[in-house]
Image: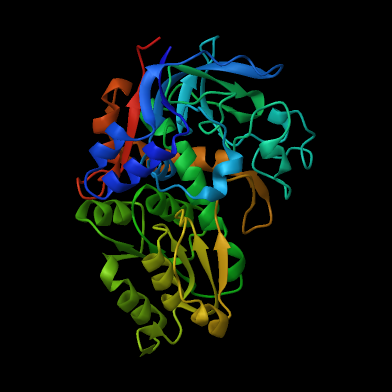
Amino acid sequence: MKALQIRRSAGKFGLARVASAVAPATSARIGPLEYRTVDDPECPGDGWHRVQTRLAGICGSDLSLVEGHASTYFDDYVSFPFVPGHEVVGDLEDGTRVAIEPVLGHEARGFAPPFEGAAPGDGDDYAHLATGRLEPGIQTGFCCSTGGGWAPWFWAHETQLHRLDAAMPDERAVLIEPIAGGVHAALLAAPTIADVADPIVAVLGAGTMGLAAIAGLKRYLPNAHVIVGARYPHQIALATALGADEVVQASKLDRAVRRAAGCHIIGGVLSSGAHVTIDAVGNSGSITDALRITRPRGRVVLLGMPAEVRVDLTGLWHRETELKGAYTYGTETLPDGSTARTFDLAIDTANHYEAERLLSATYRLDDHVDALAHAAEAGRRGAVKIAFDLRGDT
């Protein structure tokens, strides 16, 4: 079948990294991603289903790979050559439509789950990600054994399937996976603000993941006063529509938090600040900003994928700030003490906010250069989520 595939090539990764600084389309054209005929992946065993892709989103982690910026941390958690694509809505062979929870968990690899009813992303030992009956891979879309959504079809384990109501449009369903990541980050704010009368949560960045975090905060932590720093007018409009209490230009976020907290500013650092800041950008500058607007003994949640950064951590030490990573999703503890799967919460959130409003454009696989360029420049071009549309392909 014809699919988009990434093969290991130090030279092409290097060329893509250099080219991405000049033009995203160039890095997509000369980098490690190719539209080519690939071998059909073999069925990994019992409990696996063939999924025909309908829509598959383009994620920031995908762009990092295509542009040669991915961290070497993941070298042992992926297997080449692989077909990307982990934000997927597709059809099973019997016509059932599903959204994919892409983490390749314990059961997908032939191991017992860490506890009864565990989600694929649960557990505190990641040895299974590089062992078991599959080649290494943190998720569908990074594993050569399963294939991925940037192809007409791929394999998914029963534990990864979320069967969808017929009323949910594909354009909404393809947003479930990124919304799950945002909901997970939002709920990581809950322990810090549990006993706070008027909690302030700042969100830095209003791309797909920032908007998903805003939706999660307003849906499941409605008492939080959510202040958002956004860069572009359409992001400001969407963050406001999702219920953020205050949305400002990103450069003015510190002043907005200062007003809400009623605190001082000392040398560019707030004397108090937000109880929790969610960094949905993930670079050296955004982490630095998040640390300086979060109050002492507050929490910074890293929803953006930072890779290699340079940050002065003196303030983190002095203010006893907690730095918390937010990777994917699993089983969540809600403020009332109940538990739920993040993907179930994400489906609820996608329906509540009619998340298809975040899908800006779709492309065919053979238009991948334009698609990736659009995704890389989404904010500047007034877009949010870009996806591949394989409906009608076989």
Q: Quadrant of residue 115?
A: top right
Q: Percent position (x, y) of residue 90? A: 47, 21
Report the side of 61 relative to 27 (left or right).
right
Tell me if I can see residue 169 in this picture.
Answer: no
Q: Quadrant of the N terminus?
A: top left
Q: Quadrant of residue 228?
A: bottom left
The residue depicted at 64 percent of the width and 24 percent of the height is 157
The residue depicted at 49 percent of the width and 65 percent of the height is 223
Q: Percent position (x, y) of residue 70? A: 45, 47
Report the side of 321 relative to 273 (left or right).
right
Q: Percent position (x, y) of residue 235? A: 27, 53
Q: Percent position (x, y) of residue 332? A: 63, 50
Report the side of 79 relative to 232 (left or right).
right
Colour style of the rendered protein structure: rainbow
Foreground residue among 4 and 52: 4
Q: Total number of numbered labels? A: 0
Q: Quadrant of residue 34?
A: top left
Above or below, 28 relative to 244: above
The residue depicted at 66 percent of the width and 19 percent of the height is 44
Foreground residue among 34 and 200: 34
Tell me if I can see residue 89 in this picture.
Answer: yes
Above or below, 241 relative to 269: above
Q: Quadrant of the C terminus?
A: top left
Foreground residue among 292 and 264: 292
Above or below, 340 relative to 159: below
